[in-house]
Amino acid sequence: MSGPVSPAELEARLREIGAQRYHNLHPFHRMLHSGECSKGQVQAWALNRYYYQSMIPVKDAALIARCEDPGLRRIWRKRLEDHDGSRPGEGGIARWLALTDGIGLDREMVVSGRALLPATRFAVQAYIHFVRERSLLEAIASSLTEMFSPQIISERLSGMLAHYDYVTPETMAYFAARPPQAERDANFALDYVKREARTAEQQQAALAALSFKCDVLWTMLDALYFAYVSPGFVPPGAFRPADG
């Protein structure tokens, strides 16, 4: 990037990253949404994805701790309530546990994280470290995968309800509630990045941050595919489905 681009061009480049690198393109997700996964593979996905979901408030709290602007802190902390809820049993994490409960996973095993794939833990922790250590602009830009989530949520909701008889609307409550939250959060973060990324260096950093976040999500699916699809090498201590 030889010089800064307009905010509209920056947005176009950010959206191009999603079109090329978002994890809805991963073979595992295509299997999941089209009904090609065994129940054990669906369980492995939900178990490992829970760790990511449970760490999102940790990531957001780390970002808030770096904000000197009280207005930005007030807006960003709504994300904590969305995931943690305002009381026990509410929020996105509780709804994800309804999913893991509904597909037959032991809740203690899920919450403890003891059966995670090692790559899941490393990828999620890398994301948290990124948000803690990089610039505030990069930390906020890394959240822009939410721009692309409504499409994948729609595919996931309709596909899983259509193809898996053990999946119910109650099981999938997380996905029914999430799209308006993601749209609100993505719009705010996108406006922030377009406003604050003024130099070519800042704009390139924002683009790289979004690419990094796409890599985190893709890596998690690579690990699932390697362990539970092909070649099927499950690491020691990781979840082993009853159906093999």
Image: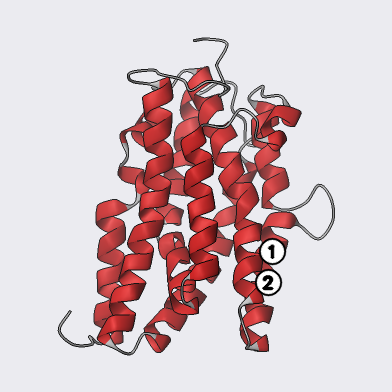
Rendering quarter of residue 43: top right
Q: Quadrant of residue 184?
A: bottom right
Question: In the drawing, does residue 52 fall left or right of residue 7?
Answer: right
Which residue is found at the position 52% from the left and 66% from the top? 131
Could you tell me the amino acid type at mark 1?
Leu
In the current view of this chain or complex, which residue is farthest to the top?
A: 243
Q: Is residue 54 above or below residue 159?
A: below
Identify residue for label 2: 77
Residue 12 locus on image (x, y percent): 26, 73
Which label is found at residue 143? none
Tag shown at residue 80: 1
As helix, strand or loop, the secondary structure at mark 1 comes to: helix
Q: Residue at x 61, y 27 (%)?
A: 115
Task: Classify 10 Å Cα crowding around label 1: few (below 14), some (14-19), many (20 and above).
Answer: some
* Pointer 2 with pointer 1, Cβ within 8 A: yes
Q: Distance from label 2 to label 1 (Cα)?
A: 5 Å
Pick the front one: 8 or 159: 8
What amino acid type is highlighted by mark number 2? Arg
